[in-house]
Amino acid sequence: MRPHVDQRQAQVLALVRERGSVRVADLARELGISPVTLRRDIEAMAARGEIHRMHGVISRVERRPPEAPAAKSPGRPGGRAGLVIGMVVPTTEYYYADVVRGAREVVEARGARLTVGLTRYLPGEDRTQADRLLSTGADGLLLTPNWEAGSPGPGEGAWTAGLPVPTVLVERWAPTGHPAAALDRVGSDHAHGAALAVQHLVERGHRRIALASQETPTTGRLRSGYEAAVAALGLEPAPPWPAGGSAEQPLTVAQRFARTLDYLCEAVTQGGVSAALVHSDTDAIMLIPRLQARGVRVPEDLEVITYDDEVAGLADVPLTAVAPAKREVGARAAGLLLDRLGGAGRDGAGQHLELLPRLTVRA
């Protein structure tokens, strides 16, 4: 005879506490019960806060020691002591260093704690890190999935919409109709940033302007803003960006860099291009001496604006750059998530926030 439901759930809880985590399918076989029955038990136990449930795995709840209540300051409504915010990002270096810094400042100012999971852009690692943070007690997630185009491809990323805690996408977006499109999100308006650079170059007298950007999650938005500005300002089109590798045989970093160098040299010498927006700063700093070595003078033959503004000011000749509001993106995303976890924002309308980059003019 199968054990009574209370005894069965007590057995499940004991096994999860002993092992830390266990696959639902394996547990059903071990206990000799149907997956449907076990799922009903898991739903009830998760609702009581006894276990964490996620994507076919259940794990124990890590009991944190009680913390003294944090005082709420007048300017920071909704703060709660003891909240843990999980943040999944590709890296804490370069661009995302400021995003994480902005999130951490807001989280800690409101009496919560930030924990970070890194993906290094590895396939599937964003979901693994999200599950890990949830299993260790994250109350909400700030999530930057590894979507190559900045948004999910067909059949990709639907899992983000099924997470069991409030979730905010950071520097990522999902198209209308995708399950993740209903998630809160905060990001930079990269299209506006690209258009800002084009407008500045037009004011300096340029009529044929190129965009040089490797394939990154930012590139699609940069290109849409660049193309819109070229059309709106009636500019002469630059030579088309060369085709790259295939999904089966992607270009290496060295090949992509060589392609960018060849493109810009030909665009100047044969295509009449006199200015370019280059993404990113590091690419621009590496490209400039190589362009000059091939007879393209910077800025006499080619005026360069960079995108990201991480190290543009450290070039031999400091470079004008477009700077996304990285720190503020992290801060706004963290604030929005904390509002969701607090009483004031729990039932409010979803929000899609895009912050405008700024142009920093240098020598």
Image (tube, helix red, strand yellow):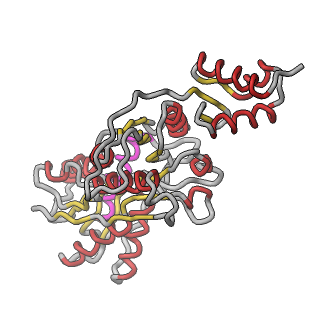
| Residue 48 sits in quarter | top right
Q: Does the magenta stretch include residue 18?
A: no
| Left or right of residue 16: residue 174 | left
The residue at the point 34 percent across, 51 percent down is 330
Q: Residue at x 83, y 25 (%)?
A: 33
Can see residue 54?
A: no
Magenta segment's dominant SS is helix
At 57% from the left and 48% from the top, the residue drawn is 160
Q: Residue 196 placed where, x, y %?
A: 28, 71
* Left or right for 136, reference 82: right
Work out which quarter of the rendered image holds the C terminus and state it: bottom left
Provide residue 329's location: percent of width, then percent of height.
33, 56
Labels in figure, total: 0
Task: Name the residue at the right extreme.
Answer: 1
**Closer to us: 320 or 174:** 174
Using the image as rendered, state which of residue 349 and residue 319 is in the foreground: 349
* Whether residue 219 is situated above or below residue 274 in the rendered picture: above
Q: Is residue 256 magenta?
A: yes
Q: Name the quarter where the N terminus is drawn.
A: top right
> Residue 62's x, y, as percent?
50, 27
Place of residue 345 in the rendered image (x, y in percent of width and height, measured from the top left):
45, 60
Res 53 seen here: yes
Does 295 sit above or below residue 2? Answer: below
In this view of the protein, which residue sits in the foreground, 5 or 84? 5
Question: Does residue 201 lie above or below 12 as drawn?
Answer: below
> What range of the chain is rendered magenta?
252-267
- Residue under the image location 53 percent in, 31 percent down: 135
